[in-house]
């Protein structure tokens, strides 16, 4: 094989690869999402099979360059529309929970196709469902600022100060999620606790 032929073959191969991967090298736009609800599973007929009836209290998103943004029940349809403008929606249990909550307010089907669900990916790799708090503590040395039960209780109190705590709690969850993903991308792994020790879980979450 001549040098010229080899060069032309390499060019042809590069063209084929470029055609097969039209988005290679392009920047993917992404947004991080977490939602809190008005009701607990025990308060809704059907429980976890009726997540759409939980009701949205507040959602928080983060993306560059907008930073953190807050969305309330009256904003739900606009939030769904906004999420749909991004190439990727990053969540922790979004497929099972966050998208289902939002489904009460509009069509979220296209969001599922854009989903990077970190919980779902870790479950696939580890064989069990990890908690955001556990992954954050083991990977980042950081903790959540409350629980889902706390968030519902604070929101329903009607106290503006307590409702603001829900917003801050939701925002912290988004911040932890963002930082976990950043760690996974920069270091190639995250830490997940199980059976009394932290396990190194290698991940490939793109960029």
Image (tube, rainbow, N blue to C red):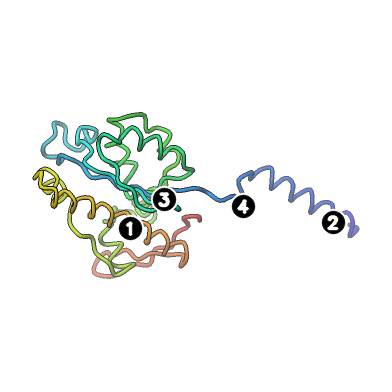
**Element at label 1:** helix
Name the residue at 75% across, 49% down: 13
Tags 4 and 2 touching, CB below 8 Å: no
**Element at label 4:** loop
Name the residue at 43% across, 37% down: 84
Residue where numbered disc 3 is placed: 66
In this orientation, which residue lies closer to the viewer: 123 or 134?
134
Q: CA distance from mark 1 to mark 4?
A: 27 Å
Dot 3 or dot 1: first in sequence order is 3
Q: CA distance from mark 4 to mark 2?
A: 25 Å
- In the image, residue 93 lies at what x, y percent? 31, 47
Residue where numbered disc 1 is placed: 175
Q: CA distance from mark 2 to mark 3?
A: 48 Å
Dot 1 or dot 2: first in sequence order is 2
Dot 1 or dot 4: first in sequence order is 4
Residue where numbered disc 2 is placed: 6
Tags 1 and 2 touching, CB below 8 Å: no
- Observer-side mark, 2 or 3, equals 3
Residue where numbered disc 4 is placed: 25
């Amino acid at each position: 094989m001549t040098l010229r032929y080899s060069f032309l073959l390499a060019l042809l191969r590069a063209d084929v690869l470029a055609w097969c991967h039209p988005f290679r090298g392009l920047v993917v736009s992404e947004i991080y999402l977490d939602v809190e609800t008005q009701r607990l599973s025990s308060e809704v007929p059907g429980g976890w099979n009726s997540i759409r009836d939980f009701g949205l209290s507040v959602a928080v998103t983060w993306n560059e360059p907008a930073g953190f943004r807050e969305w309330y029940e009256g904003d739900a349809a606009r939030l769904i529309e906004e999420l749909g403008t991004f190439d990727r929606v990053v969540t922790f249990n979004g497929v099972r929970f966050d998208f289902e909550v939002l489904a009460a307010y509009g069509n979220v089907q296209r969001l599922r196709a854009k989903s990077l669900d970190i919980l779902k990916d870790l479950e696939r790799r580890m064989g069990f469902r990890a908690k955001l708090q556990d992954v954050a503590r083991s990977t980042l040395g950081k903790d959540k600022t409350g629980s889902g039960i706390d968030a519902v209780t604070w929101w329903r109190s009607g106290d503006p100060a307590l409702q603001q705590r829900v917003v801050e709690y939701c925002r912290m969850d988004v911040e932890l999620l963002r930082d976990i993903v950043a760690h996974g991308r920069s270091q190639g792994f995250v830490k997940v606790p199980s059976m009394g020790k932290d396990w190194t879980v290698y991940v490939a979450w793109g960029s």
